[in-house]
Every structure is written in C-alpha cells, then in structure tokens.
Image (spheres, rainbow, N blue to C red):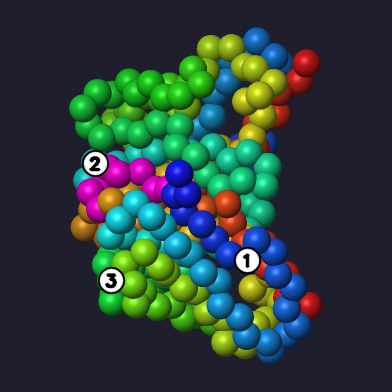
C-alpha cells in the first residue's frame, strides 16, 4: 500500500520568507512523487515530479523538492515567498503497478502575508 | 488547447435524483480518473480507467458508476444522489507511464440538498 502525509494543513509565511511544505510517503519500494498546486476555483497543476533521476528536483515558479529515502520525505521549498504563491499544495505518490493511480495527501494551504 | 474538459461546471441536485458528469480529453490518453475533493481530505479516487472499455474501482466507489465507451470520454454517474456526495469532482488523464503527470479538468461543483 502507499500513502502520503502532509504535515500542517495551513502554513503562513511572510512575503520574501522561506516556504517549507512537508510531505512524507509510505511505500514499500521507491515510488514516483509529485507536488501539485491548486489555485482557487481551478484544477490541479503540476509543480514538479520525482522519477529517480535526481534527488533534488526543480519545478516551476522557483519551487524545488528533495527526495530523501532514509527519511521517506519529499518536502517542497521555495527560498522567497511571493504573494502569488498563496494556494493549496498537494503531495502525491503513484506506482505503475497500481494503474498509475495517484494517492494524494490532504493538502496544505499556504498563506503569504505582506 | 482544450486538454481535459468537464461538464457541467456546477449542478444542484435533490436527494434521490440522478445525473451524469462528462469528462472529455483530446490528448489521446489511455488512463482517466475521477476524483472527489472535500475539505481537509485531499483528493480521493472514485473510479479509474486504464483504457477504452475498461473501468476499475478506486478508494470511494460506492454510489457511483462509470463508463469508458470511447477513449476520449469518461462518464461518472450518480444513480441516486445523497447529501454525502456534495463535493467538487475532478477528472484527470495521463499518457500511461508511472511518472507521467496527471492533467486535470477545472472541476464540477455538485451540491445535493
């Protein structure tokens, strides 16, 4: 079985501060890992994905995530928050042998204060 | 570029009514999925399809049925709507390899009174 846990349903940072959104996965073998972002009243958009090519993955809008097998983590970071980063972020895991089904975490709402 | 299109965008049903949500994709994707999104619960998989003519149950299939008669379309049906099915429904598709990202529609907001 596979699952994803996102620590913190709400995170609040000041504009210009570091963004850190936490994600831990549970999987018996290294999975594929994703971060998606959802802006209000929209569907989800892919931020970045881990596919075992490199442990540090760079995504769109200045976000990056590091895969740490020993910690079963895939935390999302951005050095300097911008007001436009306010959204809900979802970590997800999938495996081909499960029909590529994505299992999502509960989501973290990021608030950016001016 | 249409991508994944969901219709309708909004719908209000009375308990016991039925309806069908339509998802259409123009990317020739094999895999299609229906998720529901509820506050604090992320997205939960209802049903999915790994190709034309196939369907399979996800995490929360009860009360829903699906059909994939054409590769580009994936229909989600509610035979007898219940208030617990009030949610935002998302359709998604992907090309088929394990690391292929999902492409999402913009969602259907359903309220059952």
Q: Is residue A49 magenta?
A: no
Q: Is residue A83 left or right of residue B46?
A: right
Q: Chain of mark 1?
A: B
Residue at image mark 3:
B52
- Region of the chain picked out in magenta, as a range: B96-103
Where is residue A47? Give x, y as percent: 45, 32
Where is residue B38? Give x, y as percent: 63, 58
Q: Is residue B49 above or below residue B94?
A: below
Residue B73 in sight in this render: yes
- At numbered mark 3, what does the secondary structure look like: helix, strand or loop? loop
Q: Is residue A97 left or right of residue B31?
A: left
Res. B82 image quadrant: bottom right
In the picture, the disc for residue A30 is 2
Residue located 21% across and 58% down the image = A97
Q: Is residue B113 left or right of residue A47?
A: right
Q: Earlier in the sequence, mark 1 or mark 3?
A: 1
Determine if marks 2 and 1 fall on one subunit: no
Determine if marks 2 and 3 fall on one subunit: no
- At numbered mark 2, what does the secondary structure look like: helix, strand or loop? loop
Q: Nearer the viewer, mark 2 or mark 1?
A: 1
Residue located 46% across and 73% down the image = B75
Q: Main secondary structure of the magenta part?
A: loop
In the picture, the disc for residue B8 is 1
Q: Residue furthest front?
A: B1
- At numbered mark 1, what does the secondary structure look like: helix, strand or loop? loop
State how far apart marks 2 and 1 are (Cα): 38 Å
**Observer-nearest of B50 and B4:** B4
Looking at the rendered image, the quarter that the C terminus of chain A falls into is top right
**Observer-nearest of A28 and A41:** A41
Whether tag 2 and tag 3 are in contact, CB under 8 A, the answer is: no
Q: Chain of mark 2?
A: A
- Label 2, residues with CA under 10 Å away: few <14, some 14-19, many ≥20: some
């Amino acid at each position: 079985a596979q699952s994803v846990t996102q620590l913190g349903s709400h995170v609040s940072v000041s504009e210009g501060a570091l963004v850190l959104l936490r994600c831990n996965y549970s999987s018996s073998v290294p999975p594929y890992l994703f971060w998606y972002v959802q802006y209000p009243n929209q569907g989800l958009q892919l931020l970045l994905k881990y596919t075992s090519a490199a442990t540090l993955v760079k995504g769109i809008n200045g976000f990056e995530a590091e895969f740490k097998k020993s910690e079963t983590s895939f935390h999302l970071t951005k050095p300097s928050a911008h007001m436009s980063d306010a959204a809900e972020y979802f970590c997800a895991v999938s495996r081909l042998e499960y029909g590529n089904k994505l299992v999502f975490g509960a989501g973290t709402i990021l608030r950016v204060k001016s | 570029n249409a991508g994944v299109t969901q219709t309708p965008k909004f719908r209000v049903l009375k308990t016991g009514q039925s309806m069908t949500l339509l998802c259409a994709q123009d990317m020739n994707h094999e895999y299609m999925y229906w998720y529901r999104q509820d506050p604090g619960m992320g997205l939960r998989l209802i049903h999915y399809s790994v190709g034309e003519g196939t369907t399979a149950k996800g995490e929360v299939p009860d009360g829903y049925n699906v059909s994939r008669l054409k590769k580009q379309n994936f229909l989600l049906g509610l035979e007898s709507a219940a208030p617990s099915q009030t949610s935002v429904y998302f359709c998604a598709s992907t090309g088929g390899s394990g690391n292929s990202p999902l492409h999402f529609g913009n969602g259907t907001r359903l309220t059952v009174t």
